[in-house]
Image (spheres, grey):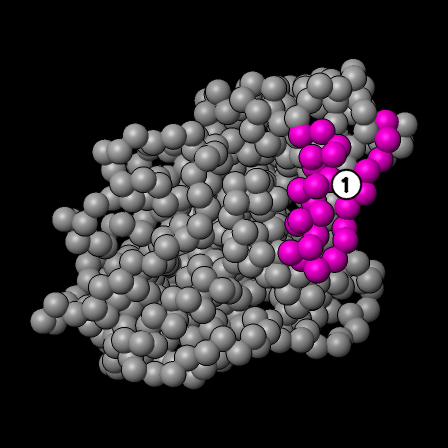
């Protein structure tokens, strides 16, 4: 594996991609594609992943950050999905501490409200049984006031506490890709698949366009896996019925001091009885999520609407009335599009929140497409895809249950606290020694009040295939979400550290800053773009 996975490496490798017939080409650089690549590479397959934008650009950097079993899926009778989810949640907690961390969730109960403590306790008993552990308890109103100052008190009966997990979704993708590359896989961003190549009715390759340098090429493969999320139908034959229902989920991020919560709160929104969350993440507080049909162009980043903003602010007021949170308090926003498999086009569609989160596989000779699915269950989804691919290759394939992540080197990094080390080990895994050398050279200062080290920015520039400034600030790190105005005040210091590492001249840096500001204002500020100028 080349240590310097960057634009210079990309330029060297691009002309060679057509020199061989790959065992497997994976289209899509989100968590689903990364998981498929990782499991194939571990088995010695010659495999290549192609991503048209940036790794985790779509849903996999804009999720609700939860690694969870899906408590509400039990109520819908989706036992297998819940069982797989709780098992994978535990696996990720065990294998990737610091990246996937347990989080206590509290559901307050009010007189006359549903679900009450008894119903909720029953659901959680089943949930815990599927997980093989007891992880819930009820707190009375007095205890809850102590645990959650500022919670709405009118009619409060108490609250039920249970445990799930949170992650940095974009870093999860990068760590899975790192494991795949260590086992010999190749992953490249900025390559768009224009069409599939077929020979006598069987998919045998792809025609790709270099979105950065221009030009196109044809790549050959023995089997193709499509894991493009909401875009999964793009490459399917035009006469096949459309089944995907893109649903938008939007979130707002508040400064941690503005709405301080020590654990996640889940409750039903007064307006539509949908579950919403308020939870601590990266030192800030997330409020989400909405669940609406997304009718906009999928090739544009999704953005929060004025109605969604009002809905999420109303949720804050409903549950934490004393805080008086308003739009002026919002640090940033993000919206993701979930690739939910709905009813076929033309049929009546019900409420978005009633759609199943189960995934499906679509087969054609030489090609397997994954549609739908969840972040938490990326590994079993990848196994399912690869079993179907192996049949086409006439290769044996079993789920041997091997870890997704190798053990992190036991490395002392002077000057870091235990929690800082855990965080960095979780996010960077086997690359920790290289990061440690940068920390030694650059120090262990953090960027503003965030947990992100300046050394992490340098590491990303050197080794994490950054093609544009938003790759660095919105996905390799989350500084664009966590810092006021997208990090505007820190831009000179970021430039000083990163410009030469990225090999950008002054004109290119200026272009990237302008591009980033416009993108941030449109897709991560308030509707109407008012946050950047505050």
Residue 172, x across and y down, in percent: 57, 59
Residue 244, x across and y down, in percent: 32, 44
Residue 362, by quadrant, is bottom left
516 vs 254: above or below: below
Q: Nearer the viewer, residue 68 or 411?
A: 68
Q: Secondary structure at mark 1?
A: strand
Residues in magenta, as a range: 115-141
Q: Which residue is mark 1?
A: 161
Q: Nearer the viewer, residue 22 or 458?
A: 22
Residue 260, x across and y down, in percent: 77, 33
Residue 497 is one of the magenta-drawn residues: no
Residue 318, by quadrant, is top right
The residue under the point 69% across, 66% down is: 94
Quadrant of the image for the C terminus? top right
Q: Is residue 307 left or right of residue 101?
A: left
How packed mark 1 is, by other alpha carbons closer than 10 Å (few <14, some 14-19, many 20 or more), is: many
The residue under the point 70% across, 37% down is: 120
The residue under the point 83% across, 60% down is: 417
Residue 119 is one of the magenta-drawn residues: yes
Residue 427, x across and y down, in percent: 63, 61
Q: Is residue 232 left or right of residue 487?
A: left
């Amino acid at each position: 594996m080349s240590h310097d996975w960057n634009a210079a490496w990309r330029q060297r490798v691009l002309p060679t991609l057509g020199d061989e017939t790959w065992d497997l080409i994976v289209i899509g650089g989100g968590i689903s594609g990364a998981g498929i690549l990782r499991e194939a590479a571990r088995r010695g397959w010659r495999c290549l992943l192609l991503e048209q934008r940036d790794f985790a650009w779509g849903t996999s950097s804009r999720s609700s950050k939860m690694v969870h079993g899906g408590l509400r899926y039990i109520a819908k009778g989706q036992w297998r999905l819940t069982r797989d989810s709780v098992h994978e949640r535990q696996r990720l907690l065990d294998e990737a501490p610091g990246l996937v961390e347990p989080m206590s969730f509290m559901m307050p109960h009010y007189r006359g409200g549903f679900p009450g403590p008894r119903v909720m306790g029953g659901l959680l008993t089943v949930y815990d049984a599927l997980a093989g552990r007891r992880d819930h308890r009820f707190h009375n109103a007095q205890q809850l006031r102590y645990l959650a100052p500022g919670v709405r008190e009118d009619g409060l009966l108490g609250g039920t506490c249970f445990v799930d997990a949170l992650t940095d979704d974009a870093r999860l993708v990068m760590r899975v890709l790192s494991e795949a590359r260590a086992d010999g896989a190749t992953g490249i961003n900025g390559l768009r698949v224009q069409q599939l190549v077929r020979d006598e009715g069987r998919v045998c390759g792809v025609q790709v366009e270099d979105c950065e340098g221009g030009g196109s090429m044809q790549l050959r493969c023995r089997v193709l896996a499509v894991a493009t999320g909401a875009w999964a139908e793009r490459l399917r034959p035009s006469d096949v019925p459309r089944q995907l229902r893109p649903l938008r989920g939007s979130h707002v991020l508040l400064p941690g001091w503005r709405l301080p919560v020590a654990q996640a709160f889940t409750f039903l929104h007064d307006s539509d009885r949908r579950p919403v969350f308020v939870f601590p993440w990266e030192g800030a507080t997330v409020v989400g999520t909405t669940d609406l049909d997304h009718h906009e162009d999928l090739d544009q980043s999704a953005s929060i609407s004025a109605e969604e903003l009002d809905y999420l602010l109303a949720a804050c007021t409903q549950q934490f009335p004393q805080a008086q949170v308003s739009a002026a308090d919002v640090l940033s926003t993000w919206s993701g599009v979930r690739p939910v498999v709905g009813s076929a086009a033309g049929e009546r569609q019900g409420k978005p929140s009633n759609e199943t989160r189960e995934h499906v596989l679509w087969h054609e000779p030489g090609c397997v497409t994954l549609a739908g699915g969840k972040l938490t269950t990326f590994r079993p989804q990848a196994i399912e895809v690869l079993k179907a691919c192996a049949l086409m290759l006439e290769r044996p394939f079993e789920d041997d249950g091997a870890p997704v992540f190798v053990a992190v080197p036991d490395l002392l990094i002077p000057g870091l606290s235990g929690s800082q080390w855990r965080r960095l080990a979780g996010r960077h895994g086997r690359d920790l020694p290289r990061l440690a050398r940068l920390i030694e050279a650059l120090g262990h200062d953090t960027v503003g009040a965030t947990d992100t080290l300046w050394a992490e920015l340098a590491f990303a520039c050197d080794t994490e295939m950054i093609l544009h400034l938003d790759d660095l600030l919105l996905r390799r790190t989350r500084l664009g979400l966590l810092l006021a105005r997208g990090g505007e005040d820190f831009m000179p210091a970021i430039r000083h550290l990163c410009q030469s590492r990225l090999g950008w001249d002054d004109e290119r840096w200026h272009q990237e800053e302008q591009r980033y500001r416009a993108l941030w204002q449109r897709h991560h500020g308030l509707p109407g773009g008012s946050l950047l100028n505050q």
